[in-house]
Image: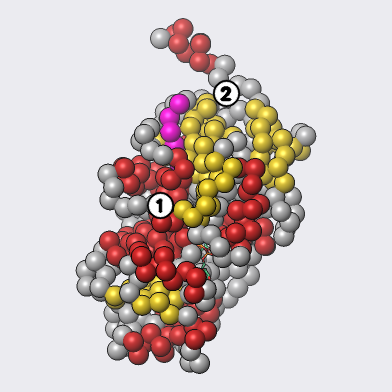
Amino acid sequence: MRSLAVSTSHFGKEVIKCKAAVAWEPNKPLVMEQIEVAPPKAHEVRIKILATGICRSDDHVVSGSLQSPIPCILGHEAAGVVESVGEGVTCVKPGDKVIPLFVPQCGECNNCLNPKANLCSQNDLGAASGLMPDGTSRFTYKGKPLHHFASTSTFTEYTVVHDNAVAKIDAAAPPEKVCLIGCGFSTGYGAAVKTAQVERGSTCAVFGLGGVGLAVVMGCKAAGASRIIGIDINKDKFAKAKELGVTDCINPKDFDKPIQDVITEMTKGGVDYSFEVIGRTETMTAALASCQMNYGTSVIVGVAPSASQITFHPMLLFTGRTWKGSVFGGWKSKQDVPKLVSDFMAKKFTLDPLITHTLPFDKINEGFDMLRSGKSIRTVLIF
Ligand code: COD
Ligand code: ZN
């Protein structure tokens, strides 16, 4: 045993030089650079990324609407293989296939201990530090530190995460698909099946039919919703939405009255469950107003620009509606991600409809352009 410990001990002790897409400035393309990735410290894991999706939240940092310190390495929806581990790591070992977790699960904070909660206190969302939990960075460019992003940073050949922000998954899982379980799929699907707990026969309205919105649709469908109304200002999103189970597609631009009035009329009083999957305050209140008084529930999935505030008539809540938020679909990340991967392997759901493009990592900016122009649902970058 001792000789094994010695023979593996130099793994992960060296700095790795590798390619990464660096966000140097807001509103500028990412730049492929050679960076240095430091070895993992105690309770940290260095991961070789195999595939990563491009999510709107990454773009929100580039555009400045989501605050996270730059220069940084974005990306938070990936699958990879453990390259090395720091002292004290027992949950994974070199060679394990893993998904990095943008919502960690430390297992010890009040939130982790509460079965109703999934937003671990160790998360680096909101007032983001862009650093490892010890307040330092593992990334440098020509010796100068670069920030991490959302505890993950996956637009790089190698990343380092804390061991509470990584889940071991089935070794046979295809990384170019299950990377979506790291964000888009789980965020949307869980909002329907876990946060809202959509029931059989219920009516739903999904505002925003991007990758996450379509995953909400998949969740509503899986839960047995009988009517799913999809709302989007881009009618090109409607065909795929219908394939996945949307029964009525509506474009707010086609009506001269507020979309909540249209939905209330269509459903004789509103839907049972509505979801905002765009990240705009106006559509958040429209989604709330679209659900039934007395018992309707509206779930906010989209993140609004950091500086925004919301105003709404309190009567909307007084009359019995429930307004909720859902981060990462309400899943407890470290324990639920491996189960979601197993469910995917058991064909309980498919990820193919969400993946419209696959590109080599080098073409990351093309992937961002397609997201911005509305051409893609998800682009997966392969390393
Ligand atoms: N009315 C109707 N539809 C609209 C409107 C509008 N006013 N504006 C835009 N849309 C449509 C767009 O045409 C598009 O189809 C859709 O809304 C948005 O889809 P995408 O493809 O831009 O974005 P997604 O699906 O990848 O992500 C959407 C989120 C809102 C989930 C995302 O932006 C977000 O806020 N994510 C945060 C969730 C999270 O937990 N992130 C953590 C990582 S840091
Ligand atoms: Zn995301």
Residue type highlighted by circle 2: Gly
Where residue 257 appears, as percent x and y from the top left, is: 48, 92
Residue 273 numbered mark, or none: none
282 above or below 78?
below
Visible residue check, residue 16: yes
Q: In the structure shown, which secondary structural element does the residue marked by tag 2 occupy?
A: loop
- Residue 141 covered by magenta stretch: no
Quadrant (top left, top right, bottom left, bottom right) of the C terminus: top right
Residue 12 numbered mark, or none: 2
Coloration mode: secondary structure
Q: Which one is in front, 230 or 340?
A: 230
Q: Residue furthest bottom?
A: 256
Residue type highlighted by circle 1: Asp
Q: Which one is in front, 302 or 207?
A: 207
Visible residue check, residue 112: no
Where residue 77 appears, as percent x and y from the top left, is: 50, 48
The structure residue drawn at horizontal position 41% and vertical position 65%, both measured from the top left corner, is 240
- Mark 1 vs mark 2, foreground winner is 1
Q: Residue furthest left?
A: 200
Q: Which one is in front, 90 or 24?
A: 24
The structure residue drawn at horizontal position 69% and vertical position 45%, both measured from the top left corner, is 22
Where residue 235 appears, as percent x and y from the top left, is: 49, 74
Q: Quadrant of residue 168?
A: top left
Which stretch is magenta?
Answer: 95-100
Q: Residues within 10 Å of mark 1 (few under 14, many from 20)?
A: few
**Marks 1 and 2, how far apart at CA:** 35 Å
75 above or below 205?
above
48 above or below 264?
above
Residue 352 numbered mark, or none: 1
Does the magenta stretch mainly form a helix, a strand or a loop? strand
> In the displayed structure, does residue 110 sit left or right of residue 75?
left
